Amino acid sequence: MTRAGGTSVRIESFRVEALKSLLADGQGPHLSIYLPTQRRHPDRKQVSARLHSLLHRAKELLESRNAVRDVEAFLEPLRQLDAESLAEHALDGLALFRSEASVAAYPRSRCSGSCARTGDTSCSA
């Protein structure tokens, strides 16, 4: 997990301690993005477009709830991700998490679809 002011996000193996740390980041907003990836090289180029679409939907969700003062600044660490590079190291998908204090990326297996979620609201893209 990388603190929000960090310069890079690495894919880490998910552990229960990581979940506890994510949940301990205090009050929201908490954003989760589930992104399917492709194992074949030509298909990996679609990952960036999917991430861009999910970040756009996350922005709409955050703005509609007035969840964060500066939505652009909140989403910026996720916009800086090199989705294609991250996808090279993922199995079937990525789970991205963002709170005021941290950013984290974990590999997912059997990722069934794209989704951005904040609190009890979610969407598919």
Image: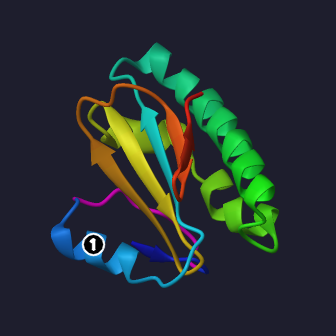
Q: Is residue 28 left or right of residue 80?
A: left
Residue at 47% x, 60% y: name it. Answer: 97
Picture coordinates of residue 66, whole percent (x, y)? 78, 65
Quarter of the image where the C terminus is located: top right
Q: Secondary structure at mark 1?
A: helix
Picture coordinates of residue 93, whole percent (x, y)? 35, 35
The quadrant in which residue 109 appears is top left
Residue 82 or residue 52, whichever sits in front: 52
94 versus 17 height, above or below: above
Q: Is residue 75 left or right of residue 69?
A: left
* Circle 1: residue type: Ala
Picture coordinates of residue 48, whole percent (x, y)? 60, 33
Quarter of the image where the N terminus is located: bottom left
Specify how the rendered protein is coloured: rainbow
Residue at 18% x, 66% y: name it. Answer: 15
21 versus 71 height, above or below: below
Q: Is residue 10 magenta?
A: yes
Q: Is residue 27 left or right of residue 54?
A: left
69 versus 43 height, above or below: below
Q: How many marks?
A: 1
Which residues, given as a range, are shown in magenta?
A: 6-13
Residue at 55% x, 30% y: name it. Answer: 124
The quadrant in which residue 45 appears is top right
Return the residue at label 1. 18
Q: Characterize the local packing of mark 1: few (<14), some (14-19) or many (20 or more) Cα atoms within 10 angstroms.
A: some
Question: Please, which residue is most extreme toward the left here?
Answer: 16
The quadrant in which residue 5 appears is bottom right
Residue at 56% x, 22% y: name it. Answer: 46
Secondary structure, magenta segment, majority class: loop
20 versus 120 height, above or below: below
Picture coordinates of residue 100, whole percent (x, y)? 60, 77
